[in-house]
Image: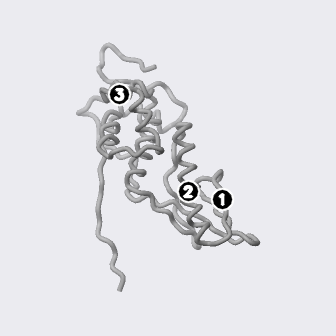
Amino acid sequence: MTKHNRKSVWWRPRQCAFARRKELSRWLRTAPEEKQRRTLFTKSDMKYPVKIEKTGESWLVSFPDFPEALTEDSSYEGALDMAWHCLLSTFDLYFEDLKEIPAPSAPEPGQVEIKLPVGLQAQIMLLNAFILSGISKAELARRMSTHKQEVQRILSIKRKTKIDRVEQALNALGFEFQLGMQTKARAN
């Protein structure tokens, strides 16, 4: 449940134990002219490192950023394919539990990277922003002028969400969504 101060039209998130939430809370309480532009999520190209190693007859797949995610396959190519499905299943669990998804760590030598599609990256940013805000799904629905069920659909990776809808939700949470582009390095 949110608390409103009669003297201010700004919403104040409930007190949270995490330092980043407290920092966000202080930032949200300031007036618009006092707010400095702040970027909480700067990773424009999410690539999660994957460790694939041979163990006897199979290839074991693990993720440095998600120690609970493990899978294996009898071939290297199959293990790489299983890594993608395992990563999606892990994200699904994080979304169901409303648990913040960590930013990808830098890959170590010998690790491969799995690049996430832009739509999934946007949904992860939305999930993390929603968790940091500390508001309820009903409050987000009210801010978006929609129903709570629609917010539940937006906060699920089982359903494809249009990027415009993700942007609308991020705006309702006080964030500006930006896409970036750069030229690819040419192979000689």
Residue 62 higher or lower than 19, as above or below? below
Using the image as rendered, state which of residue 182 and residue 96 is in the foreground: 96
Mark 3 or mark 2: whose residue is earlier in sequence:
3
* Whether label 3 touches label 1, CB < 8 Å: no
Residue 115: x %, y % from top left: 45, 62
Quarter residue 149 falls in: top left
Residue at the image point whose x is 30% and y is 26% from the top = 145
Residue 35 lies in what quarter of the image? top left
In the image, what residue type sits under mark 2? His
Residue 58 lies, in percent from the top left, at: 71, 69
Residue at image position (33%, 79%) is 186
Residue bearing mark 1: 71
- In the image, 122 versus 76, the foreground residue is 76
Residue occupying the point 46% across, 33% down: 22
The quadrant where residue 51 appears: bottom right
Q: Is residue 188 left or right of residue 69?
A: left
Residue underneath mark 2: 85
> Which residue is outermost to the bottom?
188
- Point out the tag, 3 or 1, that comes first from the N-terminus: 3
Q: Secondary structure at mark 1?
A: strand
Give the farthest residue toward the right. Answer: 56
Residue at the far top: name it. 6
| Circle 3 SS class | helix
Amino acid type of the residue tagged 1 in the rendering: Thr
Is 79 left or right of 44, judged from the image as shown?
right
Circles 2 and 1: CB atoms closer than 8 Å: yes
Which label sits in the foreground, 3 or 2?
2
Spatial CA distance of label 2 from label 1 is: 9 Å
The residue tagged 3 is 29
Depth check, front residue: 159 or 17: 159
Figure coloring = one colour
